[in-house]
């Protein structure tokens, strides 16, 4: 029987305890939603980095037209980078490597690095993530990591974790042991009902994005289960497109 736990913030990751576990990272507004949409819309791969300086170093010695730099810090687009806006990026990413730096989501992915496997999840691909977990990790311990926002709890990430848990638990022939945090995330999602857009719009980060005139992106991100794809971190530390069988391949030592 697999076990499922939810962490409320990336700062709660214990790098020793997460070893051997399966990590599913949520930064619904915006990083993991941008990752999911970016790969769906044709990016070759997405390389998550900690900050702008690391992104520039990652770009060194690459063919100029083979990549794009995408990044923000505390909601402000980094100088010389594109904004991690999933809809606006659509026309820039075809067959290119995206080097992505964000305040929370890419940092959470790095902190989860000791895990046996790392997936990127959002509302957009929640059903596909749940299917991949059922297919490949029914006997593993799964840690759903809410990235949070600059050390604070983020309602939209918790809601996203609850959505994936609800999809996961709808399969009656697979049993899961849930911690109280996981149980609460699912109950929060179920209690919110069909209010996905309101959850995102009323969250602190959602309100900030509205000040940046990004309402259209919020409505896009609020769509549940529209992409049948599961980004996972491969041996080159790049996020690539996978499906139910995306467990095959790299496992950290």
Image (cartoon, rainbow, N blue to C red):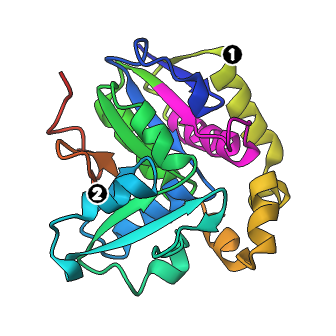
- Whether the magenta-drawn stretch holds residue 164 is answered as yes
Numbered badge on residue 180: 1
Q: Is residue 181 left or right of residue 115?
A: right
Q: Which residues are magenta?
A: 143-168
The image position of residue 131, as x and y in percent, is 40, 43
Q: Is residue 186 above or below residue 106?
A: above
Q: Which residue is mark 2?
A: 57
Q: Nearer the viewer, mark 1 or mark 2?
A: 2
Q: Is residue 235 left or right of residue 45?
A: left
Residue 217 at x, y percent in the picture: 64, 74
Of the numbered discs 1 and 2, the one sitting upstream in the chain is 2
Front one among 118 and 70:
70
Query: Residue 119 location in percent, x, y?
Result: 38, 42
Identity of the residue drawn at 23% across and 38% down: 247
Image x and y of residue 171, in percent: 49, 34
> Does residue 194 show up?
no
Cα separation, mark 1 vs mark 2, equals 41 Å
- Residue drawn at x 47%, y 19% is 175
């Amino acid at each position: 029987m697999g076990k499922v736990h939810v962490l409320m913030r990336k700062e709660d990751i214990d790098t020793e305890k997460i070893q051997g576990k399966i990590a599913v990272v949520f930064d619904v507004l915006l990083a993991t939603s941008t990752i999911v949409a970016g790969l769906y819309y044709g990016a070759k791969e997405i390389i998550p980095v900690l900050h702008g300086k690391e992104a520039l170093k990652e770009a060194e010695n690459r063919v100029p037209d083979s990549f794009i730099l995408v990044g923000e810090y505390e909601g402000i687009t980094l100088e010389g980078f594109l904004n991690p806006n999933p809809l606006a990026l659509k026309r820039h990413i075809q067959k290119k490597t995206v080097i992505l730096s964000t305040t929370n989501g890419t940092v959470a992915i790095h902190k989860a690095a000791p895990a046996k496997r790392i997936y990127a999840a959002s509302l957009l691909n929640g059903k596909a993530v749940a299917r991949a977990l059922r297919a490949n990790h029914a006997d593993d311990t799964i840690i759903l990591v809410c990235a949070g926002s600059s050390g604070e709890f983020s309602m939209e990430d918790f809601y996203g974790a609850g959505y994936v848990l609800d999809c996961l638990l709808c399969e009656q022939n697979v049993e899961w042991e849930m911690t109280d945090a996981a149980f609460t995330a699912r109950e929060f999602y179920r209690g919110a009902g069909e209010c996905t857009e309101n959850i995102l719009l009323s969250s602190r980060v959602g309100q900030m994005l509205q000040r940046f005139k990004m309402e259209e992106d919020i409505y896009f991100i609020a769509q549940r289960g529209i992409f049948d794809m599961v980004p996972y971190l491969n041996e080159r530390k790049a996020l690539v497109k996978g499906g139910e069988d995306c467990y095959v391949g790299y496992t950290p030592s």
